[in-house]
Structures are given as C-alpha cells and as structure tokens.
C-alpha cells in the first residue's frame, strides 16, 4: 500500500470537502425532520458533529424498527428486519443501534469490537460469522474452525449466534459430500462458540460456477441441517426461485434476503407501477427493501417469505432512505 | 470563480473519452483526490471534487448489466469483456472517493470485491479478462496486484478483515510465481507459472 495514499485518504474524520454552512445544515435538518425525501445531496458532506445531529433527527423520526422471529429453528430470536453489516460505514453503527437494529451480519470480519458495541451487553444483539469456503474448498474443517476462533480472539465477541457457510456450495453433490464446514460448526457448537448453522448461498446467474437456486436450496431444505439461509432476492427473482424460498420459509428456516438492491435496482427502476404500489415512487432503494420484505409466500399466500434483509449502507442518506422503508410496515 | 483553475470544469470529454472507455479514469480520480488532499483552496477543492465525481459517474455507467455473470463490473470498450485488472483499479478509485465525499460509491467497490473473492483461483490470482456475460475467462493472462490493492484498501477503510485471506493468497502468488515476467497458464497442467 502506498504510504502517501494512506495519509491523503485517512478516512472521513478530516473531510477535505467543504462542509455545509450552518444555514444550509438547518435547512437540511428541517427537511429530514419532515421526512421530506432523501436529502442525500447534503448528507454526504457533513462534518462529524453535523452527522451526529442529523442522525438524531433521522432516528427520532424513524423510531424503532419492527422485529420478526427469525424462523422456527432458533428459539425466539427476534431480529430487526434490516440488519447491520460489518461493511457499513462505521459512523452508521450508532444510528443503527438507535433505531433498534439488533443483528450484525459478517461480525466475524471486525478486527476489533466497535466502540458503539462495547457499551451494550453482548446479549442485546445477535451476530453471524460468514465462514469463507473460498476458493472452492468447503471441505476444510480446520480452516473453517480457525476462522471462527481467530475472529473471536480479535473482536472479543465471545460467541456468534449463527455460523454461516459463506458462498455456500458449488453443486448439490458438493453440499452432500464436502462437509468440512459442518463438522467445524459441530465442533464449535460443542465449545459454545456458535449456536446455529446457516448458509449464505450464491447462485447462477450472477455468480459463475454455482448451481441454480431451485436445486441447491431444495437440497439444503431437505438436509434439515440449515437453520438460517441468506439468499439473493429482489424484484428480478423468478417465480420458480421465489417458490423454493417459500418452501424454505415453510420448513422453518430463518430467511434473510441479500442483493436486494444490487440485483433488483434495474428491475425496480424499470417498473414505476411497482414503485408506486410500494409507496416508494422514485426511491429505488426504499422500493427494493419494501419489495423484499413484503413479498408473500406463493404457498401460504399471506406470510412474507423473508424475515429480514441485508442492506449495504455507506452514508446517512442511504441510511435514511433504507431504514425509513420500514415506517408503517410490519 | 477565479480564472486559475476554471479550465477544470470547462473540459469537454474528448472524442472516445468517458462514455466508451473508462480505463484512464481510475488514475484520473486518484490524481484529483491527491490534489484535493493537498490544496488549501476551498474553491479549488470543490472543482476537483466535482470533476472526480463526474469521472466516477462515467465508470458507473459502464457496468455490466444485471443477469450477466460480470454484473456490476465495468465493461471494456468492446462491451463484451471485463478486465479484472482495470475494474479493480476503478473500484479502488471509487472507494477512495467515498472516503472523501461519503457518496454512493463504496457499495459498488464492495460488490466487486465480493465477486473477486469467489473468482480467485486457488493459486491466488485472477484471469485478467473475463467474458462479461458468461463469466468465462478469456485468454491465459493472470493478474493479482490490482485486485490485491482494492481488497486491502477496503479492509483499511472499514477496519475489517473481510478480504485478508484472499489478499494473502494474492500476495503469495505475486511472491512465488515469476510474475510479471511470466503470468501464463500452462494449458496442459492448468497451472500458472
């Protein structure tokens, strides 16, 4: 890494961008308090103290996020419907906790416990660790085991609620026979370092050399091993794939949607009628979240398939747009 | 605005620049951000920032569409291929821009980094060129330096270790293969050397 770069781009604390004037900022706060749209134009250029003030206004307006029981296999684990992720802008952890987000995705990648989380009891929030099976080796028990143990030593979390096999498996056959990841989970569970087994399953198209969802998801459901499943779901997901996700929900698996925007923004942008129906006309991120969390099961016809979703939030404007999606939404 | 740097905003895209080819823009953005970091003039900062954001927007316009295997990575001028090397440089530039303006760039870089993680060959390198729609490697040229730089940058900016293992495999390939003097795949053994 170039040392000069590290000095020049040392993060956001010393933004070289011109901060908003007090008058501009007060105008922005008024807009935010009224819920008057995504004032993201101004929210990227805030000083740290202005950001804290804006966060306070936004979190007060949003209130607390609704929570939902994450499937039927993990006790009474009630999670916020939008998750915090370790690749969020760390400046958003505080606002995230303030609106009641209580599940941290990919917490295993934290080098140390962020200050916002040091202030609250470990039992106050849930975490998962994505245990990488890349490249191409979901059968390495020791490597999977060491990822978990090493990360706990770094961040001091004590345990993870969900051990999530990251990227999943590249074929049904691999899922059935390359069981190193699962053996690592069993070992770690005995040591009380993890509680439940999950998967973050990739798929084709969108990622090369992965099986089509209907096959791999059905195999994972049939195995009875998976407590929690994170999958790509958006407005571009086909009815056939939607149905297999509904079957996973029906089997009691905790369902998390990912790539809601990355995969769904194009389809959503091209469908103003759907945006309108979702009450998010012109607000693509908000529409994508509402779609993913409200899509009902074609099997039961009533329950939403997904209990929660992951959203990559990198600035306060996105935070406002995404979190506000849940206002008036159960 | 004083005349000293008004030329920065008055530049018109050159024929063939921007909309059809993004490959010069990562370096362009880095240079502007470096200027931005060392200049004291608020007026000049604003001009530099605007120009860097325009360049970033051009990169984002070049992304392969949803449904393609290379979705989310910028396309080469032929509209059919992706260069892992140049795409990585572009995404690192976007990540650096995010660190300065807090704009909507980081997610793009994270998406590409996530894909790099699953595309990495077991030796630690990546094919330089992929067919954007199918994701199939094209040619036998390999790379690791540009992806490595992107992965390290993201972990640095976010205080995470999401890409540490991937980056270490890339370093291993850089150190223990005869790169860049030889970066070809032996078609018989399918190994890089």
Image (cartoon, coloured by chain):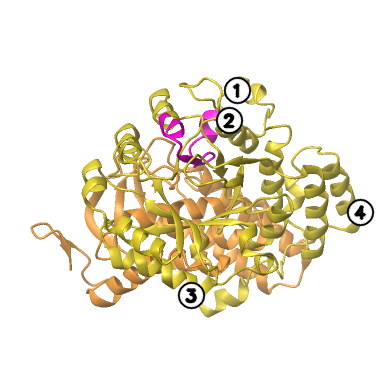
Which quadrant would residue A320 be assigned to in this image? Answer: top right
Numbered disc in front, either 4 or 2: 2
Q: Chain A hue?
A: yellow
- Which residue position is annotated with label 4? A23
Report the Cα–Cα distance between label 1 and label 2: 9 Å
Q: Residue at x 52, y 50 (%)?
A: B108
Which quadrant would residue A150 be assigned to in this image? Answer: bottom left
* Residue at disc 2, secondary structure: helix
Report the Cα–Cα distance between label 4 and label 1: 37 Å
Q: Chain B hue?
A: orange
Report the Cα–Cα distance between label 3 and label 2: 38 Å
Which residues are drawn in magenta? A247-269
Say which label, 1 or 2, has the lower sequence index. 1
For the residues bearing labels 4 and 3, Cβ distance under 8 angstroms:
no
Report the Cα–Cα distance between label 4 and label 2: 37 Å
- Which residue position is annotated with label 1? A274
Q: Is residue A36 visible?
A: yes
Q: Residues within 10 Å of mark 2 (few under 14, many from 20)?
A: many
Q: Chain ID for label 4? A: A
Vertical relation: A279 (above or below) A148: above
Residue A166 in the image, given as x and y percentages of width and height: 39, 53
Observer-nearest of A197 and A103: A197
- Which residue position is annotated with label 3? A153
Report the Cα–Cα distance between label 4 and label 3: 47 Å
């Amino acid at each position: 890494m170039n040392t000069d770069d590290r000095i020049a781009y040392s993060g956001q604390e010393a933004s070289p961008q011109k901060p908003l004037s007090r008058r501009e900022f007060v105008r922005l706060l008024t807009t935010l308090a009224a819920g008057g749209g995504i004032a993201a134009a101004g929210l990227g250029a805030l000083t740290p103290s202005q950001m804290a003030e804006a966060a306070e206004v936004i979190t007060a307006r949003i209130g607390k996020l609704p929570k939902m029981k994450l499937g039927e296999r993990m006790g009474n684990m009630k999670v916020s419907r939008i998750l915090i992720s370790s690749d969020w802008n760390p400046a958003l952890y505080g606002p995230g906790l303030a609106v009641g987000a209580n599940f941290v995705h990919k917490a295993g990648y934290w080098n140390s416990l962020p200050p916002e989380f040091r202030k609250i009891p470990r039992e106050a929030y849930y975490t998962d660790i994505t245990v990488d099976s890349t490249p191409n080796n979901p059968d390495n028990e020791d490597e999977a085991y060491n990822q978990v143990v090493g990360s706990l030593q770094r961040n001091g979390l004590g345990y993870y609620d969900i051990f999530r096999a990251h990227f999943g498996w590249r074929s049904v056959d691999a899922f059935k026979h390359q069981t190193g990841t699962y053996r690592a989970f069993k070992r770690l569970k005995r040591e009380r370092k993890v509680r439940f087994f999950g998967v973050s399953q990739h798929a084709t198209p969108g990622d090369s050399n992965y099986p089509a969802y209907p096959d791999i998801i059905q195999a994972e459901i049939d195995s009875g091993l998976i407590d929690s499943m994170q999958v790509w779901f958006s407005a571009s997901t086909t009815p056939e794939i939607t149905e297999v996700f509904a079957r996973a929900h029906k089997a009691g698996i905790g369902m998390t949607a990912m790539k809601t925007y990355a995969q769904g923004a194009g389809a959503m942008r091209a469908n103003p009628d759907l945006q309108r129906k979702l009450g998010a006309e012109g607000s693509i991120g908000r529409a994508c979240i509402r779609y993913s969390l409200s899509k009902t099961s074609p099997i039961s016809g009533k329950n939403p398939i997904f209990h929660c979703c992951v959203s990559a939030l990198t600035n306060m404007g996105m935070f406002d747009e995404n979190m506000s999606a849940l206002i008036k939404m159960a | 605005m004083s005349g000293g740097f008004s030329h920065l905003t008055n530049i018109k895209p050159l024929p063939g620049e921007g909309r059809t080819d993004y490959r010069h823009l990562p370096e362009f953005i880095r240079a502007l951000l470096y200027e931005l970091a060392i200049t004291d003039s608020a007026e000049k900062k604003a001009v530099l920032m605007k120009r860097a954001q325009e360049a970033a927007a051009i990169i984002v316009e070049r992304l392969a569409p949803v449904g393609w295997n290379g979705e989310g990575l910028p396309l080469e001028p032929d509209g059919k291929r992706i260069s892992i090397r140049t795409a990585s440089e572009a995404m690192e530039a976007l990540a650096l821009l995010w660190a300065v303006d807090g704009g909507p760039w980081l997610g793009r870089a994270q998406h590409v980094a996530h894909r790099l993680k699953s595309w990495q060959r077991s030796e630690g390198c990546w094919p330089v060129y992929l067919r954007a729609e199918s994701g199939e490697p094209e040619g036998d040229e390999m790379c690791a330096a540009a992806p490595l730089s992107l992965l390290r940058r993201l972990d640095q900016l976010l205080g995470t270790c999401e890409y540490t293992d991937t980056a270490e495999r890339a370093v291993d390939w850089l150190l223990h293969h005869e790169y860049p003097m030889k970066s070809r795949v032996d078609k018989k053994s399918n190994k890089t050397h």
